[in-house]
Image (cartoon, grey):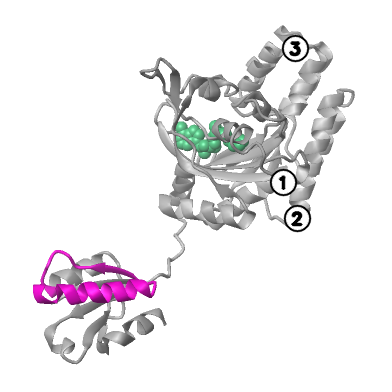
Amino acid sequence: MLEYVEGQARKMGQLYGYKEIITPLVESYELLAAKAGEEVRLRMYAFEDLGRRMIALRPEFTPSVARVVATTFKNEPRPFRLFCIGSLYRYDEPQQGRYREFWQSNFELMGSNKPEADAEIITLTNDLMKAVGLKNYVFRVGHVGVLRGILSEDKVDDKAQNSVLQLMDKKQYEEALKLAEDSGASQESMAVLRDLVDMKSLKVMETVENMRERIKGYETAVKAAENLDEILRLVLESGCKIDMNVDACLARGLQYYTGMVFEVNVPELEVALGGGGRYDRLIELFGGEPTPAVGIAHGLDRIMLAMQKQKTGLKEDDEKKVMIIPITGEFVAKALEISRMLRDAGISVEVEVMRRKVGKALEDADRREMNYAIMVGEKELKEGSVVLRDLKKREQKILKIESLAKTLIT
Ligand code: HAM
């Protein structure tokens, strides 16, 4: 099943023009920790290597991709679209949907600060959810610039802002509000923050409008809301059928986000199936040219879990599978020759390599849901033929070897 979901993610990469890259499983701790946020930083498998360097198993792909774009690919024309698929490691308490080793497909679009880039990442994610057959999934979308814009106006420093957002991310709203107040947020701003926490989710564009109304006077926060408005408008106007809720307090655990942020959820699971957003300053932090970027990581284990809960059948793979069975040891070489001929014609073939009796070999082919069995024996070979058995229809016929490939393909 992982292979299937991975395959669908790769297909999205191809449909949207993303190139796959492979990044190291072990990275410098400093690189991974730079803007990770407490939540991820404290959960890294970090250790010292023999050269006394602090290293860690990657907890996410984004810093590695940003490093590669800042160095190896620094002269590539922009925009630059990359994706990675692989395993990641976080010291989480294992529970449903939360593992210490898990898989992501991660897409990054580098070089554009325009809302259409953000919209592309959202629609790509929607297309992937649809492609694996999920239903009732909902996008929660926000913009870190709204809360940061309000807090900055009151000179709340970056460290305190990060902690407020971190608490908001964990839905510990009272603690977040208290910290904002203790860190210097004015009474007026506190009232606005409280209203944003309590803001009801209406139709997407109405919620953004209400948010914009409520934060009037906070110039950078208003700009953030306008940016969110443009992104969501583009997603909707592109004809993408998508269920979205706007949440001004969605913060996400990672500290590198500078703009729109989002997560995808299904009602059957408490944890998110994917999350991402805009991070415009990470690449320059790693020594590259200032490069705006936006991306998303899909949690493949959680997508599989959601598919099981929703009983989403995998789409049938229509590739035919063939088993070749030599009747006795004498016909093994001929069976190998026929297998080579069929593979050359693009047909997927397994040869019976246990020298089992035909009955047993056929049982095995059935158990493994093969479509056809070809039996190679003395009587038919004399005529240049073999027995072709359709394992689904339970019928068989004698066929000339040279017409096998044609029959199996049609
Ligand atoms: P993240 O929200 O930390 O974002 O992880 C993305 C997704 O990975 C989650 O929504 C979840 O589906 C899956 N995931 C995370 N931790 C676990 C776990 N312990 N067990 C199972 N699944 C898990 C990032 O990783 C960012 N790098 C996303 C991004 C890309 N932002 C911009 N570009």
Residue 145 in which image quadrant:
top right
Q: Which residues are magenta?
A: 329-358
Q: Position of residue 64 (x, y in %)?
A: 54, 32
Marks 1 and 3 sit apart, C-alpha to C-alpha, by 31 Å
Seen in the picture, residue 330 relative to 112 is either above or below; the reply is below
Q: Is residue 31 visible?
A: yes
**Quadrant hosting residue 262:** top right
Q: Earlier in the sequence, mark 2 or mark 1?
A: 1
Amino acid type of disc 2? Ser
**Whether residue 87 is situated above or below residue 392 in the rendered picture:** above
Q: Are marks 1 and 3 in contact (CB under 8 Å)?
A: no
**356 in the magenta segment:** yes
Amino acid under label 1?
A: Ala
Which residue was labeled with disc 1?
A: 119
The answer to whether residue 1 is magenta is no
| Between discs 3 and 2, the one toward the N terminus | 3
* Residue at position x 45%, y 60% in the image: 313
Q: Is residue 377 left or right of residue 73?
A: left
Q: Residue at x 14, y 74 (%)?
A: 358
Indicate left or right for 115 with 241 as reference. Answer: right
Q: CA distance from mark 2 to mark 1?
A: 9 Å
Q: On screen, 191 above or below 57?
A: above
Secondary structure of residue under mark 1: helix
Q: Is residue 387 left or right of residue 190?
A: left
Residue wearing tag 2: 238
Mark 2 closeness class: few <14, some 14–19, many ≥20 residues within 10 Å: few
Q: Can you tell which mark lies on residue 156?
A: 3
Q: Return the residue nearer the eye: 299 or 291.
A: 291
Q: Is mark 1 within 8 Å of ligand 1?
A: no
How crowded pointer 3 is (Cα within 10 Å; few <14, some 14-19, many 20+) is rated as some
Q: Position of residue 269 (x, y in %)?
A: 50, 40
Q: Quadrant of the C terminus?
A: bottom left
